[in-house]
Image: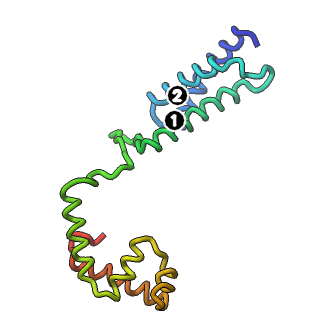
């Protein structure tokens, strides 16, 4: 395929690329950016195209790979765009994790947890630390139903003692 044929075929696909990009991004501007980046990458890697193979599939594969790589980068940085009407920027990082309110809430919660009777406190703390019900039952030498019951009752007591923590 000559250079002229390559560029002609590539520019002929531009409208299809833009439509395909819209299915990925659901946003006009992002679709335009993805289309431009796809065209640029196709030009840069022109030598990798094998003549007499499906050119359209080759270009669309480039677009798909660019989108996947961008998505992975965004999720690794914990930032994703919500493409709703108001366009919110969402982060997976907790909002006020180091705030004084959270610190005080944590202290209050800890204080209330330690008010629990020993029979509820130990299974509750073990469950909170990540132990499974079966593991707790084996370590404490009590039936699994008793473990579940004690954890449930501990939660119920804490919810009564801390009215703001119902959920």
Q: Position of residue 29 (x, y in %)?
A: 44, 28
At 66% from the left and 20% from the top, the residue drawn is 45
Q: How is the image coloured?
A: rainbow
98 or 67, which is in the foreground? 98
Label 1: state its secondary structure: helix
Q: In the rendered image of this protein, does residue 116 appear above or below residue 37?
A: below
Image-based side of 3 in relation to 133, left or right: right
Q: Mark 2 or mark 1: which is in front?
A: 1
Q: Residues within 10 Å of mark 2 (few under 14, many from 20)?
A: many
Q: Quadrant of residue 163?
A: bottom left
At 26% from the left and 70% from the top, the residue drawn is 165
Q: CA distance from mark 2 to mark 1?
A: 10 Å
Q: Are marks 2 and 1 in contact (CB under 8 Å)?
A: yes
Q: In the rendered image of this protein, does residue 93 appear above or below residue 66?
A: below
Counting residues from the start of the chain, the first of labels 2 and 1 encountered is 2
| Residue underneath mark 1 | 70
Tell me the quadrant of the picture where the C terminus can be found.
bottom left
At 76% from the left and 13% from the top, the residue drawn is 1
Image-based side of 16 in relation to 164, left or right: right
């Amino acid at each position: 395929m000559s250079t002229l044929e390559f560029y002609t075929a590539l520019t002929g696909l531009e409208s299809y690329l833009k439509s395909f990009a819209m299915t990925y991004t659901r946003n006009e501007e992002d679709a335009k950016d993805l289309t431009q980046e796809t065209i640029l990458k196709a030009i840069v890697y022109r030598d990798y195209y094998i003549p007499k193979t499906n050119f359209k599939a080759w270009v669309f594969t480039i677009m798909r790979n660019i989108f996947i790589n961008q998505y992975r980068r965004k999720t690794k940085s914990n930032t994703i765009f919500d493409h709703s009407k108001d366009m919110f920027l969402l982060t997976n990082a907790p909002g006020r994790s180091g705030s004084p309110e959270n610190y005080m809430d944590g202290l209050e919660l800890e204080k209330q947890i330690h008010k629990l009777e020993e029979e509820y406190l130990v299974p509750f703390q073990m469950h909170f630390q990540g132990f499974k019900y079966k593991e707790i039952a084996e370590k404490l030498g009590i039936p699994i139903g008793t473990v579940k019951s004690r954890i449930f009752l501990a939660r119920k007591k804490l919810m009564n003692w801390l009215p703001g923590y119902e959920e």
